Structure formats: C-alpha cells, structure tokens
C-alpha cells in the first residue's frame, strides 16, 4: 500500500462510500472519489485532516455517487474528472434521479476520462481503467496497490446490472480484467459496503463462481501424456 491513506465516509440515503485519498497520513494534498452526498461533512473532514482537495474523481454518474460534486467543487476549487460517456448525466443530474431523492446540483465536468489515462494528482499516480457493465462509462482508479472500484465489485457482491446501460456479461468481463491485471492482495475500496481484496472476492464471492472456475482451469497443470 506504500503508506496510502484512504478515509471512507458512508453518505446519503443509499449509503454510498465517498473517499478522501492521500499519499500518506502526513500529506497535505488529497483527492475525493465519488462525493455522493453530505458535502458539508466531506468538506469538514478534509479540513480536519488538514488537506487541500486537488481533484474530484468520479467512477460513474449514478446520483448516489455525484450528489455532492457541485458544492464540493465550488468550495474546494478542485477540478472534476468524469467518465466521458456519462458527462451529460452530471450536467443534468436531476433528470436521472428517482423520486424521493435530491435535489442535487448539476455540474459541467472539467475533465473527461475514457480509460487508459494516467493522472498525477496530489502526489499520487492514478491509473484509469475502463470497467463498464454497471454503467456504460464506469471507471476504476488504481493507485499504490489499491483499487477504487465504484460499483463494479463489492465485498461479497457486484454492481447491479438492471439499471439503464447495465449488462452482466460486460460487468463480468470488467471484473475479469481487474483480476488478471492486479495481484490478489490488491485492496478494493468499493462504492458500497466494506473494504476487501481481489483475492478474497475471487475465492468467496458467489457472483464470481464462473470466473473462479475458468481462471482455476487456466492455472491447472497440464495432464501428463498417457503411455501408448
């Protein structure tokens, strides 16, 4: 983990995990990932930690992950990085919010990402990975031995695929790409529920049973040739 300091804040009616991430516990610069609600609480936490928010990173634009983007961006002056496919949703947020939630402010993203980019923010190197399936433009951020996975992979579960743009086969391929690309000990900070690791989920997550079998079959030693 190289000293990475990740602070989790479960916010809003949907209990979404927003994160303040900095290079180590003494760093005075940080990023916020998926500020979904309770902007005052997130800003107060940043002030309490003594950090300046240098960027706001979004994994996707479902309302529970972006509800506090506008007020946090306005108060901190931090630029917002948004999946390019989902930029219109952030810019017209209430058109996509179900009854009973909000109101939330729209925001025009300062930067868009498609996956494959590398960002140096607050003294940290982020790798941006395109991981669609839960939403069309979903991104995962890899930094210093950790994944900020949004709603791709949870502790014992995965992101739902019954929302507009969701697709199980696509999500499964996104998860497989993470499992192949990063070691088992990689820490996963998800958009809901608790922190986990890729290895734990591969071994125990019931939604990954087919992936578990296929990856295990690839790693099994070849059978010795039979004598003729």
Image (cartoon, rainbow, N blue to C red):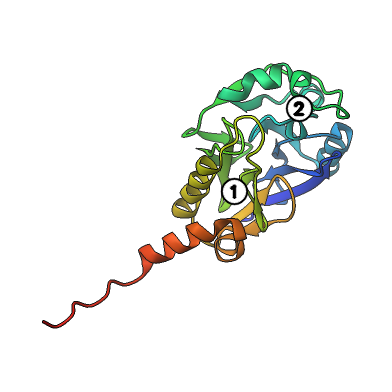
Percent coordinates x, y for residue 24 in the rendering: 67, 50
Q: Name the element at disc 1.
A: strand
Query: Relative to 212, does residue 37 appear above or below in the rendering?
Result: above
Q: How far is mark 1 from mark 2, CA to CA?
A: 21 Å
Say left or right for 199 vs 32. left
Q: Which quadrant: the C terminus?
A: bottom left
Task: Say which mark, if any, is on residue 55.
Answer: none
Query: Relative to 40, does residue 21 appear above or below in the rendering?
Result: below
Query: Relative to 194, does residue 166 appear above or below in the rendering?
Result: above
Q: Residue furthest bottom?
A: 227
Taking the image as drawn, is residue 1 in sight? no
**Residue situated in front as seen by the camera: 25 or 220:** 220
Q: Earlier in the sequence, mark 1 or mark 2?
A: 2
Percent coordinates x, y for residue 92 in the rendering: 73, 16
Q: Which residue is mark 2?
A: 69
Q: Which residue is mark 1?
A: 147
Mark 2 residue crowding within 10 angstroms, few (<14) / some (14–19) / many (20+)? many
Say left or right for 21 vs 125. right
Taking the image as drawn, is residue 157 in sight? yes
Q: Which quadrant: the N terminus?
A: bottom right
Percent coordinates x, y for residue 104 in the rendering: 83, 23
Say left or right for 1 vs 102. left
Say left or right for 123 vs 106. left
Instruction: Please tell me in which quadrant of the rendered image residue 142 appears.
Output: top right
Q: Residue at x 52, y 47 (%)?
A: 172
Mark 1 residue crowding within 10 angstroms, few (<14) / some (14–19) / many (20+)? many
Q: Residue at x 59, y 56 (%)?
A: 207
Q: Residue furthest left?
A: 228
Q: Name the element at disc 2.
A: helix
Percent coordinates x, y for residue 158 in the rendering: 63, 49
Q: Residue at x 75, y 52 (%)?
A: 193
**Residue situated in front as seen by the camera: 103 or 186:** 103
């Amino acid at each position: 983990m190289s000293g990475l300091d990740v602070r989790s804040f479960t916010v809003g009616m949907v209990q979404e995990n927003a994160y303040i991430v900095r290079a180590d516990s003494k760093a005075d610069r940080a990023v916020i990932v998926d500020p979904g609600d309770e902007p005052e609480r997130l800003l107060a936490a940043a002030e309490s930690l003594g950090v300046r928010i240098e960027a706001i990173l979004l994994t996707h634009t479902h309302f529970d992950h972006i509800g506090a983007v506008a007020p946090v961006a306005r108060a901190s002056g931090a630029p917002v990085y948004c999946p390019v496919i989902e930029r219109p949703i952030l810019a017209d947020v209430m058109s996509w919010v179900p009854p009973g939630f909000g109101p939330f402010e729209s925001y025009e993203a300062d930067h868009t990402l498609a996956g494959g980019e590398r960002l140096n923010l607050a003294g940290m190197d982020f790798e941006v990975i395109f991981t669609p399936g839960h939403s069309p433009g979903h991104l995962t951020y890899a930094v210093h031995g950790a994944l900020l996975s949004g709603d791709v992979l949870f502790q014992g579960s995965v992101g739902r695929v019954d929302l507009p743009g969701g697709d199980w086969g696509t999500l499964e391929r996104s998860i497989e790409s993470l499992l192949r690309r990063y070691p088992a000990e990689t820490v996963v900070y998800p958009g809901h529920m608790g922190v986990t690791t890729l290895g734990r989920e591969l071994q125990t997550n019931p939604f990954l049973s087919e992936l578990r079998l296929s990856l295990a079959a690839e790693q099994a030693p070849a059978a010795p040739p039979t004598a003729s």
